[in-house]
Image (cartoon, helix red, strand yellow):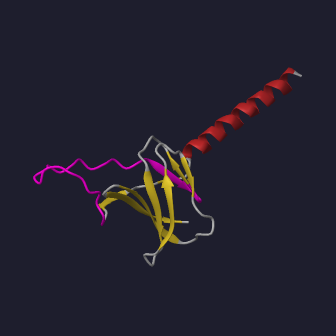
Amino acid sequence: MKKIVFALLLCMLSLSAFCQSSVSLGGTPIEWQIKKTDNPVKGGGSVHKAPAKLPTPPEATLLENVLNFLDSHAEYTLYIISEDGEEVYEALVPENTSTITLPLNLSGEYELQLVRGEYCFYTNVIL
């Protein structure tokens, strides 16, 4: 009887460790590039202002149609752009949101864009 309980306990621990490692992987890491948007946010300041430090992109992974953010981040507007350059999806990504589910009806290659102010993080993905 003790052997059966011990074997079951060992199996449960192994399964638990496997599930945790699978969840922590969370998909393919996103490698963001950065560009300035066409419509920078208007603001005051001097004409000879020093260039601002470029913002740091959020750490994220993509698993099928789920975009997971691995750390805290600012609020963004998410755009999905088709290969033809058409905007096919737009959504607000609130500050520190951990998961965004992308539309299931999209398949193929797209550009994901996270826009905040005058900066845009972008990457190409296959959905």
State yes or no: residue 59 in magenta: yes
Return the residue found at the far top: 2
Is 48 included in the stretch rendered in magenta?
A: yes
In the rendered image, residue 23, in percent from the top left (x then y), is placed at 60, 43
Give the image quarter of residue 30.
bottom left
Farthest residue to the bottom: give it: 84
Q: Nearer the viewer, residue 68 or 103?
A: 103
Can you give x and y, in whole percent of width and height, for residue 120 in the image? 35, 59
Q: Quadrant of residue 118?
A: bottom left
Identity of the residue furthest to the right in this view? 1
Residue at screen point 41% across, 46% down: 74
Image: 20 above or below 37 = above
Kindly identify the residue that appears in the image at 48 percent across and 64 percent down. 125
- Of residues 2 and 123, which is closer to you in this image? 123
In the displayed structure, 3 sits above or below 19; it is: above
**Count the marks: how many?**
0
Q: Give the range drawn in magenta.
A: 38-66
Residue that appears at 32% across and 57% down: 119
Residue 104: percent from left, percent from top: 63, 65
Q: Nearer the viewer, residue 16 or 69?
A: 69
Query: For this rendering, which residue is in front, 27 or 76?
Result: 76
Q: Measured from the top left, where is residue 109 in percent x and y?
A: 50, 71
By secondary structure, the bulk of the magenta-drawn segment is best described as loop
Q: In this view, does 42 lie to the left or right of 13?
A: left
Image quarter of the C terminus:
bottom right
Question: Residue 9 vs residue 2: left or right?
Answer: left
Farthest residue in the front direction?
Answer: 44
Which image quarter is the N terminus in? Answer: top right
